Amino acid sequence: MQLLPGLYVVGGSLMGLTGSQVKGPFDECNVYALDLGSEIVLIDAGVGDSWPQILEIMNQWGLGSRKISTVLITHPHYDHAQGAHFLQKIGIKLIAHKYTAEVMAKADERCCGFLYHREFTPVSVDCILEDNQQFSVGQLAVQSIYLPGHTLGCTGFLVSWMGRRLLFSGDVIGTLGYGHFGWNGSIDFDKKLYLQSLLKLLKIDFDVMLPGHGLGTYKNPRERVEVSVNEALMTWR
Ligand SMILES: [Zn+2]
């Protein structure tokens, strides 16, 4: 479905688009598509099995004829990154933070394939990011923001789009539609770093938050960050 001019969500179980909505929000993450005109950038790769459906959805929005050049991966969990090996095979470049890249190459339990009773397929990321890095995809300038906690690879991607600053926030905040945090069961979950990441996010100026699961926030996304910070400060002792 279209979210803003040139911005679409083309996959996601909680959105009712791909995977199983009944099995739950984590069956497949939101897969976003940014239409740059000459090329398309995806945010997160999903689980891979849904790729035919994702392509069908993209065709419905008239995106099918354009080349998908790149996918930005927010973190190495199975529901966000398992599709990456498949996307790379069809010529799509993978970009991720160095920790996420290391985990995806090792394909170990930090990918959480065990939650899905599946093995993560190892893949070598094409472009590896440092903690906070400015880079470009075609005409699009992207700022990566390292936000470890939910996993140690969590990275947000900030872009300017039609006069607004969009943050693709992965599973850092409110993956079920409101404040709160991402899932806390990952083997590399880290509360201390998570709280630091939430406090860091409070200082970042953005207008629209597009999380890894569930609905985005187009008005005052800071409120969602504040709710999460408050909850962390009250309960993480
Ligand atoms: Zn996750």
Image (cartoon, helix red, strand yellow):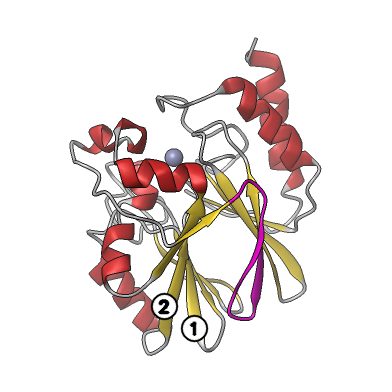
Between 92 and 32, which is closer to the camera in this rendering?
A: 92
The residue shown at (70%, 15%) is 234
**74 in relation to 110, above or below:** below
Is residue 25 something one can see in this rendering? no
Badge 2: few (under 14), some or many (20 or more) residues near its Cα, within 10 Å?
A: many
Residue at 33% across / 47% down in the picture? 105
Mark 2 lies on a secondary structure that is strand
Horizontally, residue 185 falls left or right of residue 97, namely: left
Q: Ligand 1 quadrant?
A: top left
Which disc is residue 39 wearing? 1
Identify residue for label 2.
Answer: 68
The amino acid type of the residue labelled 1 equals: Glu
Left of 103 or right of it: where is 23? Answer: left
Give residue 16's quadrant in the image: bottom left
Query: In which quadrant is the C terminus drawn?
Result: top right
Q: Is residue 65 shown above or below 17? A: below
Query: Against 181, is 76 above or below?
Result: below
Secondary structure of the residue carrying tag 1 is strand
- The span shown in magenta is 130-142
> Residue 144 is drawn in which quadrant?
bottom right
Amino acid residing under circle 2 = Ile
Residue at 37% x, 72% y: name it. 92
Q: Which x, y percent locates residue 121?
A: 23, 49
User: Residue 146 vs residue 230: left or right?
Assistant: left
CB under 8 Å between discs 1 and 2: yes
